[in-house]
Amino acid sequence: MPPAADTALRRTPLYDRHVAAGARLVPFAGWEMPVQYESVKAEHLAVRGSCGVFDVSHMGEIETRGADATRFLQHVLSNDVEKVATIGGAQYSLLCREDGGVLDDLFSYRLEPDRWLTVTNAANHHRDLEWFRRNAGDFDVEIEDRLDDFAMLAVQGPLAREIVQALADGPLPPRFTAREQQIGTTRVLVCGTGYTGEEGVELLVAPEDAGGVWDAIVGRGAVPAGLGARDTLRLEVCYHLYGNDLMESRGPIEAGLGWACKEDTGFVGSDAVRAVREAGPREKLVAFTMEEGIPRQGNPIVRGGEVTSGTMSPSLGVGIGMGYVPAARAEPGTRLEVDVRGKVRAATVKPKPLYSRS
Amino acid sequence: MADANYPDDLLYHTEHDWVRIDGDVATFGITWYAQDSLGEIVFFDPPEVGSTVTKDEPYAEVESVKAVSDVYAPLSGEIVEVNTALGDKPEAINDDPYGEGWLVKVRLSDPSETDQLMDAAAYTASLP
C-alpha cells in the first residue's frame, strides 16, 4: 500500500494500466508516474531499436487565444514566434525572467491563426500560467489552463511513425508540426515532436480516450517505457531537463540554447540574453563521458562547475553527463575531473549529442 | 531477475546484506530483496583490498541507472578480496546475487558478531 502522503499525488488516466503492467510508480512533480516497467535498459533499447510508448500526461498545457495571441507569445517566449507562419507549426522556446534566468522550456503549437497550445513541464505549469497572466497586460488575449483537458502519450523510436500511421486516418504531421486527426475512433492532436532523439510523435488526447489509444499502440508492438528510460534517452542526445540543466539562476546562452533566442523580438529577458551573448558567457553547459563511474546531479567539477545531469548510458555503456563549466574549459576534448562523492574521476568533454544513430 | 529467494545456509543483516562464513573469512553480498529494490545495477564501486570495514557502516556503493546506494558491512574485518568481475558485469548482482554477484571477502576481526545476524527465516519474516 502506498504511504498516506502519496494520496495527494495525481494519477494519470493510464494509472491502472501501469499498475497492471507491473510498473514501479514514483512521485514526480506531484504525480504518481511509472519510472520503469520491467527494466530501464530494456525500455531504453526498445526506443532506440523499435518503438516505446511513454505516458507523459503530467505535462501541462496552456492555451493562448485572441487577436493578440501571437504578439503576446512573441513578447513572453524567447524564439521568433511569428516565424511559425503555418497552422500546425511547432516551435521550441524558453520562458525567461527579466534578468534572463530560465523559467521553463516549452513547445508551442499553432492550432489556428490566433490560437496556440503551449506544453509546459509539470513542475513549472502553474508558475508558467501565472507568468503568462501577469505579462498579459494590455494584450487582447485569453489564457486558459488546459492541464485537465489532455492526457499525453509519446510514441518514440524508428518504428513509432509506422505504428501510429497504421491507426491514423491520414498522413502523420512531419517533424515539428502538429495536426488534429483520428487515431482509431479518437480525435487526437498529433505532434511530430519528442524527447528521445528518435523519430516519433506525441499525442494529446482527451483523458477519457487515453486508455484506448494506449491499448491500440501497445497492441501494435510499442513497448511501455517509463520516466527512467525517458531520462537516459534524452541525456544521451543532450536534451535539457528543466530543474537539472535549466534553472532560474542561469540563462539560455550558458545552456547552449542561443539558437532558440531571437533578441530582436524584444521578448521579456531579451536585453539580458543579448548582453550575455555579446560578452560571451562565463560558463557553458557541456556534455561529457566518464572513464569510470557514474556522474550524478550536484557532483562538483574540479576547478569549477557542477554536474547537472548524469547517468549510465545504456547505448554507450559508460557514465555520461552534462554540467556547467567555466567557458574556457568547454571545448570538446577538454579533460575534466568530476568529484563523485569524494572520488575524483576522469571525464572528457564531448560534442553534443553524445549518441547518434550511426 | 528470478523470484525471491533467501538461501538457508547464509546469515542476513537488517540492511539487506548476506554473509557466507568459511572459517575466519566471510563473503558479503546483497540480498535478492536489495537488488530487486535497486533495479538494474550498473556500477559497483568496491573498497580497497586491505582496508577495514566496520559492522553496520557503509563500505561500498552500488548504483542503479537512477540512484546510488550504500552497502553496509554486516560484520567487521579486513577486505581480503573484491569481486573484480563485477567491473565488467555489475548485472551479476541482479542475476545471481548469492553466486557470481558476491561483492567482497572479509577476514573477520570479531567472529562473535555473527550472533547478531539473522537466519533466512528471521530475515524473510522481517521483509515488508
Image (tube, coloured by chain):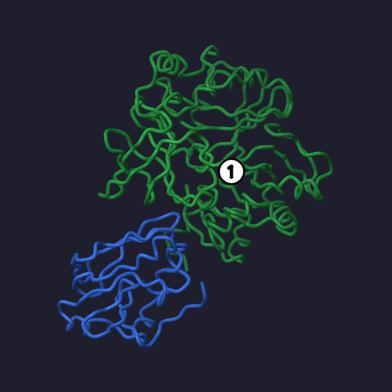
Chain colours: A green, B blue
Q: Residue at coordinates 75% horizontally, 50% vertically from top-left?
A: A163
Task: Count the marks.
Answer: 1
Camera-side residue of A210 and B5: B5
Where residue A247 sits in the image (x, y, percent)? 41, 33
- What crowding class fits label 1: few (fewer than 14 Cα within 10 Å), some (14-19), or many (20 or more)? many
Chain containing the residue with disc 1: A
Left or right: A64 as drawn, with respect to A188: left
Image point (39%, 70%), residue name: B34
Residue wearing tag 1: A196
- The answer to whether residue A157 is above or below residue A275 is below
Picture layout, residue A62 above or below residue A9: above
Which residue is at a point 49% across and 31% down the rendered structure image?
A: A130
Question: Residue A248: x and y, percent?
Answer: 40, 30
In the rendered view, tell whether residue A55 sits above or below residue A348.
below
Residue A21 in the image: x percent, y percent? 61, 65
Does the rendering let one see residue A204?
no
Q: Is residue A251 visible?
A: yes
Residue B53 is situated, as x and y percent measured from the top left of the image, at 20, 68
**Amino acid type, mark 1:** Thr
